[in-house]
Image (tube, coloured by chain):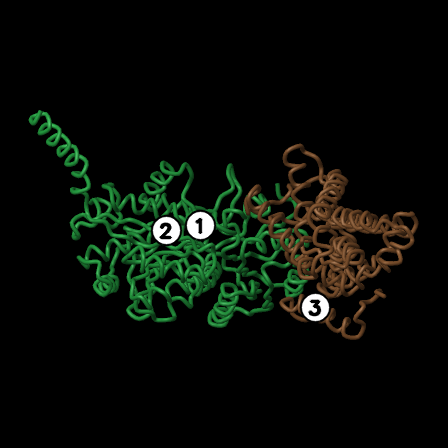
Chain colours: A green, B brown
Amino acid sequence: MASKHFVRIVLSLLLVLVFSFPVYAQQKVIKIGAVYPLTGNIASTGLDCRRGVDLAVDIINGKYDLDLPLAKTEGIPNLGGAKLEIVYADTKGDPKNGMSEAERLVSQEKVVAMIGAYQSSVTKTASQATERLKIPYVCSDSSSPTLTERNFKYFFRVSPHDDIFAKDQFNFLKDLEKKTGKKINTVALLYENTEFGSNVGKSEEKYAKEFGYKVVANVTYAANATDVASEVGTIVKSKPDVVMHASYITDAILFTKTFKEMNFVPKGFLTMAGYIEPGYLPAVKADGNFFIVRSTFALDLAKKKPLVGKVNALFKKKYGMDMSENAARSFMAPFVLADALNRAKSTDAEAVVKALLETNIPGNQVIYPWKGIKFDPKSHQNIYAQGTLVQILPGSQQEYVTVWPFDSAAKNVVWPFPNWKGRK
Amino acid sequence: MEEQLLQQIVNGLLIGFMYSLIAIGLTLIWGVMNIVNFAHGDMLMIGMFTSFWLFTLYGVDPLFSIPVCFVLLFVMGTLIYRFIVSKVMKGPMLAQVVVTFGVSIFLSNLAVYFWTPDFRLLPPTMLDGTWEIGDIILSIPKVVASIGSVIVSLCIFFYLKKTKTGKAILATEMDRESALLMGINTDRINSLSFGIGSALVGAAGGFLSTYYYIYPQVGGLFGTISFCVVALGGFGSIEGAFIAGILVGLTQTLGGYFFDPSYKYAIVFGIYLITIWIRPQGLLGW
């Protein structure tokens, strides 16, 4: 009897050991907080960002033959191969929730760093919370210039901001003049009146002066307008060569329809945001053709940068769809953080911030057409971040094609804007 | 310059007729029952989605879905009155104010749940393209929607003035107590007006869907503007709402054109404030 008892005890002990072994052998986990709009009006955008982040974490934690920071090793080598774990929190697209969720992630989930939150207004409040709690925040998906004008100690931005995008538009016009030999003289500025649009408007006005273009119309409007006939009328009256439009999605749809209806054909439309949202083309279909949109990413970059093709193949395998602009933007933040954690050899906030400041990721290790990632010591904005311009082009499949900078262009830009009538 | 001005007047009229039709439904409910239907904009949204789905699923042209929108929203309006609004009619004032607000939130969230918050546009239907008269460009769907709006408004106007039931509705609107004394079943009239009011906005949704994008929150600003139109025209006055709708449409486009487009809604609401200051009962109210 006693021996039977003994066997039972030994067996159960073994069982316990067997089950506890993997736990015992498991690596340390480093928790990173991510705030995104996962429900509510722009939930689809939040989900898109999340796909990018999840794929990035897969690549960091696993072993991949890719030219991305820490892709070839498992986890963070200098921290004993520790794995990253993303703890998501839902902002519902509301700045209030952004702040409270960031606080909760730090105090309850004990995250050591933060990423997110897509909308600039939410990033603003969430990063205020992390700044106060002394937690590093790496943002690669919000574009309001004001975020890096605050000179926060713990906040870093990888992606370009709207001021850079605005300057890009004028650089494009200058390049185009050189290429075609035809002078462009006047621009009309059209922008929605919240933080995003009005900041873009301000930047565009500044650069128009600097680059020597005459602003013939300066029109602001509310993004939820029921009718934009008078806005378009004002622009038509001013007869601009080029229209620069900073919009959200509803207004992008409404303006596209009204431009067509009033048969307004300037030399070109340079647009932002709304025109590249996933919902835009399904709504306007062929009417979206030939609009030029600012972007940080386009799949056709793969032709010049094989890394983009490889990453997109992984993305497609995981989610069954191509990588979008949003997913591609959010994709980079985990790498920047992992790289800094690795060099810091610690999760201590001060050490990570120091490492972030020393970040120097070369251009061949990012999926955008940049020279790399290096932060400005004061503003913490990536000094190499640059935008590209993509144009919506018809074809077997309507798509966004990189047309500027001319040396990374996949196709020649269609300029001037073709007349609405007589299009097939 | 000159042609742009004419163009703007035309555009103002085209959007104005739409506002009129939306506002007539609201003013009827407001006038008869003395309650504000906050769900009015969301009923517009339901009308738009009805037309969208009839086209997408069964290929019915929006022009033919309009009667369907009208009937469907009539039924929906009647049911909302029977089961929700009538229950609080005898309750405190605040409950009456809040109840349609609740319906509004319910409807728009239901739409998000069923149809996602995506934006949709009907593809070019029977009504597409533009007419050009001289230098003025007319969008065909907008012109047809405006004509439709005038026809529906005229029908409802004659229905109210000429038929017995219509007169009963107007009588209830003027003086509920006396109407009751004259043997008018005011509860039935309430239900009928709520139904007709909803049906009108349903038809408006049908027309609007031919050229406007459709999504669950589309009713928001249209709803706010129709409150302003109703108050400007005079509570319960059909003719008032019709004229005020056109006035608001014109003010919005011309104000935006002559001043700054960013002030166009401010100008509309400014004129409204001045009007009710001089004439609190509205242009044609009593």
Which callout, 2 or 1, points at the residue further toward the start of the chain? 1
**Helix, strand or loop under label 3:** helix
In this orientation, does residue A313 appear? yes
Q: Nearer the viewer, residue A267 or A8?
A: A8
Chain containing the residue with disc 3: B
Mark 3, residue position = B269
Q: Position of residue B68 (x, y in %)?
A: 74, 39
Q: CA distance from mark 2 to mark 1?
A: 9 Å
- Residue B26 falls in image quadrant: bottom right
**Helix, strand or loop under label 2:** strand
- Determine if marks 3 and 1 fall on one subunit: no
Q: Position of residue B211 (x, y in %)?
A: 68, 48
Mark 1, residue position = A38
Mark 2, residue position = A88
Callout 1 amino acid: Leu
Chain containing the residue with disc 2: A
Q: Which mark is residue B4?
A: none
Name the residue at the front extreme: A1
Q: CA distance from mark 3 to mark 1?
A: 36 Å
Chain containing the residue with disc 1: A
Q: Position of residue B196 (x, y in %)?
A: 79, 47
Please count the marks in the image: 3
Dot 1: few (<14), some (14–19), or many (≥20) neighbours within 10 Å?
A: many
Q: Are marks 2 and 1 in contact (CB under 8 Å)?
A: yes
Q: Position of residue A141 (x, y in %)?
A: 40, 56
Q: Is residue B142 left or right of residue A119?
A: right
